Amino acid sequence: MTDDAPTPPADDVPGETPAQKALRLKTAKIDARPKPPRGGRFQREQNAKIDAGKSRPWMSK
């Protein structure tokens, strides 16, 4: 017995639109990325690299 209807992939959610599927896959891909360490010395070092006046060089004389 052959079935002409295509079988949905394993990651399909019933009733999900293509846009919803794309968004779900995109967020899953972003969540799978390695994240930088949070808090502690690393974050203080990152914040210390930018001085208050460096963002507006036209303000210094």
Image (cartoon, helix red, strand yellow):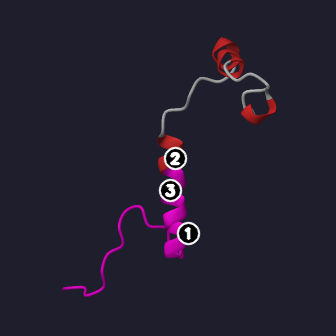
- The kind of secondary structure element at disc 2 is helix
Dominant secondary structure of the residues highlighted in magenta in the image: loop
Whole-Å distance between the Cαs marked 1 and 2?
A: 15 Å
Residue type marked 1 = Gln
Q: Nearer the viewer, residue 50 or 56?
A: 56
Residue shown at 65%/21% (left/top)? 46
Q: Against 60, is 31 above or below? A: below
Is disc 1 surrounded by few (<14), some (14 to 19) or many (20+) residues within 10 Å? few
Residue 43 drawn at (x, y percent): 67, 20
Is disc 2 surrounded by few (<14), some (14 to 19) or many (20+) residues within 10 Å? few
Q: Which residues are magenta?
A: 1-28
Disc 1 target residue: 20
Residue 12 drawn at (x, y percent): 44, 67
Disc nearest the viewer among 1 and 2:
2
Horizontal placement of 14 versus 59: left or right?
left
> Which quadrant does the N terminus fall into?
bottom left
Disc 2 target residue: 30
Disc 3 target residue: 26
